[in-house]
Image (cartoon, coloured by chain):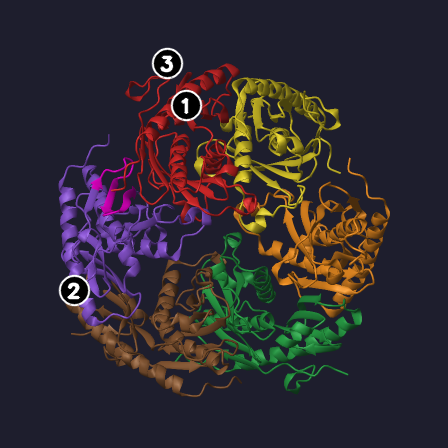
Chain colours: A orange, B yellow, C red, D green, E purple, F brown
Amino acid sequence: MSYERTQGRAAHALRPVRITRGFTRHAEGSVLIEFGQTRVLCTASVEEKVPPHKKGSGEGWVTAEYGMLPRATHTRSAREAAKGKQTGRTQEIQRLIGRSLRAVFDLAALGERTLTLDCDVLQADGGTRTAAITGAFVAAQDAVQRLLDQGLLQASPIRDHVAAISVGIVEGTPLLDLEYVEDSACDTDMNVVMTGAGGFVEIQGTAEGAPFTRDEMDQLLALATAGIHELVGLQKAALAQPLPLAE
Amino acid sequence: MSYERTQGRAAHALRPVRITRGFTRHAEGSVLIEFGQTRVLCTASVEEKVPPHKKGSGEGWVTAEYGMLPRATHTRSAREAAKGKQTGRTQEIQRLIGRSLRAVFDLAALGERTLTLDCDVLQADGGTRTAAITGAFVAAQDAVQRLLDQGLLQASPIRDHVAAISVGIVEGTPLLDLEYVEDSACDTDMNVVMTGAGGFVEIQGTAEGAPFTRDEMDQLLALATAGIHELVGLQKAALAQPLPLAE
Amino acid sequence: MSYERTQGRAAHALRPVRITRGFTRHAEGSVLIEFGQTRVLCTASVEEKVPPHKKGSGEGWVTAEYGMLPRATHTRSAREAAKGKQTGRTQEIQRLIGRSLRAVFDLAALGERTLTLDCDVLQADGGTRTAAITGAFVAAQDAVQRLLDQGLLQASPIRDHVAAISVGIVEGTPLLDLEYVEDSACDTDMNVVMTGAGGFVEIQGTAEGAPFTRDEMDQLLALATAGIHELVGLQKAALAQPLPLAE
Amino acid sequence: MSYERTQGRAAHALRPVRITRGFTRHAEGSVLIEFGQTRVLCTASVEEKVPPHKKGSGEGWVTAEYGMLPRATHTRSAREAAKGKQTGRTQEIQRLIGRSLRAVFDLAALGERTLTLDCDVLQADGGTRTAAITGAFVAAQDAVQRLLDQGLLQASPIRDHVAAISVGIVEGTPLLDLEYVEDSACDTDMNVVMTGAGGFVEIQGTAEGAPFTRDEMDQLLALATAGIHELVGLQKAALAQPLPLAE
Amino acid sequence: MSYERTQGRAAHALRPVRITRGFTRHAEGSVLIEFGQTRVLCTASVEEKVPPHKKGSGEGWVTAEYGMLPRATHTRSAREAAKGKQTGRTQEIQRLIGRSLRAVFDLAALGERTLTLDCDVLQADGGTRTAAITGAFVAAQDAVQRLLDQGLLQASPIRDHVAAISVGIVEGTPLLDLEYVEDSACDTDMNVVMTGAGGFVEIQGTAEGAPFTRDEMDQLLALATAGIHELVGLQKAALAQPLPLAE
Amino acid sequence: MSYERTQGRAAHALRPVRITRGFTRHAEGSVLIEFGQTRVLCTASVEEKVPPHKKGSGEGWVTAEYGMLPRATHTRSAREAAKGKQTGRTQEIQRLIGRSLRAVFDLAALGERTLTLDCDVLQADGGTRTAAITGAFVAAQDAVQRLLDQGLLQASPIRDHVAAISVGIVEGTPLLDLEYVEDSACDTDMNVVMTGAGGFVEIQGTAEGAPFTRDEMDQLLALATAGIHELVGLQKAALAQPLPLAE
């Protein structure tokens, strides 16, 4: 007997994914990405400077910051700016986003500039970090395109797509793209980041309850691989549209 | 000779104002308010506890927090959570929002619970604090209505509407509802908070360049009074609609 | 029936104001200002450097910091240095003092140097921020005079006097220069900053209880205007004396 | 052609592992664990209290903190206590250690008490987090044994062994237990945490350079599985010895 | 050949010492103490609560905080509240003041209340910590007297006087009560805290340049002993006067 | 009747002292020093830069940091890095270690580089700061020797030995080198830092209970002088051995 998902979603199905480019007007790239009820605003900012460890290297830098609005969640969580520090969870996620994006960037080709991906969760329903990576890639593309259009870059430093999805085992059933109630109930939770070419960039699997077996892991990776393939298609479709003009 | 506004806006005209209730689904009240290109997400959260200075008083508390996404602005500003502290400007604004809302609340009638208004700027183009106050009032109404619907309150603790607008003098011309380019250029900048009945709750006027005269202040107050009257009408119209169901 | 003030003070009367120049010896300007029992030590420090946003601009900077000794108040308040952060109230006040002083300074004429006004409350009985602004102006004058005497400046960058006073409505009576018990009881509290020429620099009015009317505001502004006129006279009288020699 | 390791170590070989119990005398469990030149002091402290989210639950808590002495590394790194904050890396590691240990603990059987694992790196040469997990398990066993000896527990809340190892691909060769020079040079880096029964608790794989393939991952997991099996044997051997008396 | 002091002061002479009781009006004890140009405001605050480590012990607590106004010194020093932390020097001094006062207090006789001595330097010219201890004792006496007058205490918990002085060797000459220029130039600097009965409470001697000999230390201790004897006499004389009424 | 020490130690006897050079391999100097059960790891790090106040001076700097592992003590103490600040005690101790080492350094002869002594307590049983000073000196010697060996220095900037010991009066008996139980019980506690030539660098004596007399202080200083003479001998013996090769 397998686990019954909300709205009869199939175990291997993504939630409805929407990618809205040009969501805000000031950033070089600005994307609202929705995985069902999870909504993350991803902006890409270009700055003509690099952090100290890249100064004079001829290379650029790609980094990310992550935040969650206090009432993105079921009960209000304390504002990190008011507490005066980011939680360990926040830091872990933003480090993951940064590494994932850098995996498809040629930093030398970017030149000595910094691309910052700000991923702010407006509404959370599970999978915020994987939505953030998937949306940040689209925002990064738009920002790079602007640099190309302005003649500041001759060729794109982006070598491939990158996208991410969560998978997990709930009541014995492997599921793709966990929503919040599934995430809370799952025995095993895994976040997978892959390139468009199908290479793994990050795998983070955690046994929340019982340890997981090699066989379970294989099932989860198969689900994730198919899901990411689908997400890359959605990224491409979104990028194939003309960028909406700011109103 | 008077100042020419963008899109030919009249000196006494508000920018297009849009109030979207139910913008996110977890908060007891959730409103996206737009004053032209300025967009602020205002959520109202109810918690069944009060801060120490209200414990055992039989009274509730209404408070606010304010934030700006790093790329809400033309150039990226540092994330306060990452810096580990809120700026003086942020603290000043969130104190103002809290006082403004408390001015129309009967804290005894609220009972020993806390209403927190989180006002987060998604996109900034001047007037974020006045949009925040105006939108937070609508979110507060929705949160109170839910308490009434649940039978947790018998009567509303809200005694009147409250709304806010900025006014200023740019190149000698008094203007209502300054957008960013006007705000940067103005000699005098004033934020006015008023109740639906027309009483003043807060007036904060600052000479950015030359000091302002009593006569100029009178003109600004007249502009603000009319503008707030219009905003209160828009709040009422928005609240007269049924609350959109969460998808 | 009107409100009875302590010691039979008239509604439009200032408390006894004392301005003691040269109160401490190291600062370029050092003034103890007393509004009745409120005592604030204002020092002006000249440093031959400017903050980053003024570097290379040819302009100087004028800024302020505000503090309150832990036992300046009726009950001991926590030391901000020990808590590791300044309160929102402190930041709001020091930003106000800085803006007020800059309103009468020609920053280009000051040259690339910084004038810092430290306003530390030794004893509080209401009106500490307005006393701070009024005293800081005198300290700034003494610091500028020293730069002129040393030949570091050819002409004063100070264009006018600036002073401040609080006004409020207590039990229906508009009052000038609120002391602590009046401040706690007032319905409306307003701080007004004006130049010697009578221009408004800042107006900050807050309804603590019921909102205030346009008519009440007019009465308060009239009281404040007269009070500040008197304070500017006292500043001039104090500055007309020779600076006492350090013992 | 495969990668040549220092001292001719085989690709599938662990560095010499030493586990010294009773390394310091105050902690309920105190273990120095060495993976070659990497040395981590792991202490287990029992406190008869639980964090707020466990109060009244009847369950205990197991948590971890991680630190690195400033000169554990080739060049001195800043002391986190002096900087006033822990890095994201530190928080990520201590969260991993805590989750790994909790995976083999029955928190209800522990009772309402907290076991804190402090893992402090005295000398770093790669693999500090995996050494920390492996050593912390032994320290936890000693602390639990003391609770059993004192009659505070009737049965052990520890359900299985847990140990961890790093694996990676360097110049195309999959290697077990990376030392610092290998860690710096590797294309893919993976940390694996497993139980004594062979279940996966955590898998964290990161492509440092090129993305990795499914086939590479399978090779890495096989290496890790064998390595952890060996480590569990070493934990058992160490625990089979009598606890050395404090001098 | 001996060192020539400013104003021809003898090597064994204190600077003029002034002790002004009732300097501010809110604190239970408020003393301005001056050692020449060094001026420290010492307030004693009584609070009917104790820190956690004294709760339920039947004993009270005596503690101190120390601060320096930014422009108490020749060049402006950064405000600790603005920097968000107290320097090591500040913490060292306030710990010394607290220990010194506790040395003459019977904490059981004080009852479960806290006496906080706030020592804030208005003007610094060397010896601020010793002036602070000497003045804080007088403020503590006034606060205790008030508790006796109010019937909250039946007998004084203060067992003896305590006072402090600095001594040092400048250009080979042992000197009492170093002022700033001497302090900067001295080879050895020693702060001595003694009771009225002549017992040592604290001795902190530091070789700033060359190490000091046993013979030099004996000379310094003799100077300090005589100086403190004189200070205790001045404390007694100040306390013998009626407490000035607050204006 | 005199106080009976653990293991029949004589009042004037040091605990067994062990000095292990080369304890860790990355630091330029690395010493584990043990005073009985007190164990402190002292590393000396050389960096080719100086703090701002020494830039361009031609002089170097010697500084120290001190820390205690959370479970170095009988009950676990909070990790300073997790709390986000160092305690006053920690700062006081690291300032003392830094001053003590600088007392025997010729900073001009060191050249514009910084020597940082990190003293981390692995196990505490009283006297951690005096062990730290004594061990840090040996680590500093090894670091300087390496600079000499590398030809970066022509002559040693170290002018003399420096070592430290605690003394105290327990139940009327003056004792050398207090262990924890003695430290907790003592009436007077004194830390003495001396050079090899017998000059005093620091004396810090504190009456924990009753004030101490001049005669008691003389006895304590005699004990300390002899103890430090012995420690300097042990430093010399340790340094006379060849530095053990890193395994």
* Separation of residues labelled 1 and 2 (CA atoms): 62 Å
The residue labelled by disc 2 is F213
Residue at x 40%, y 52% (from the top left corner): E86
Specify the segment rendered in magenta.
E20-46
At label 2, the amino acid type is Thr
**C119 versus D50 height, above or below:** above
Residue at image point 57% right, 25% down: B192
Residue A213, percent across and down?
Answer: 72, 68
Q: Secondary structure at mark 1?
A: helix
Q: Secondary structure at mark 2?
A: loop
Q: Same subunit under labels 3 and 2?
A: no
Q: Which numbered disc flags the more N-terminal residue, 3 or 1?
A: 3
| Location of residue B100 by image quarter | top right
| Mark 1 or 2, closer to the camera | 1
Placement of the C terminus of chain D among the 4 image quadrants: bottom left
Amino acid type at mark 3: Ser
Q: Chain of mark 1?
A: C
Tag nearer the camera, 3 or 1: 1
Spot occupied by residue D226 in the image (x, y as percentages of width and height)? 68, 78
Q: Is residue D143 above or below residue E135?
A: below
Residue F233 at least partly seen = yes
Q: Which secondary structure dominates the residues rendered in magenta?
A: strand
Q: Position of residue C206 (x, y in %)?
A: 49, 26
Relative image position of residue B5 (x, y in whole percent) = 71, 26
Q: Are marks 3 and 1 in contact (CB under 8 Å)?
A: no
Q: Looking at the rendered structure, which numbered label has been put on residue C2?
A: 3
Labels 3 and 1 within one chain: yes
- Label 2 Cα neighbours within 10 Å, binned few <14 / some 14-19 / many ≥20: few
Q: Which residue is mark 1?
A: C228
Crowding at mark 3 (Cα within 10 Å: few <14, some 14-19, many 20+):
few
- Above or below, comparing residue B53 to residue F188 in the picture: above
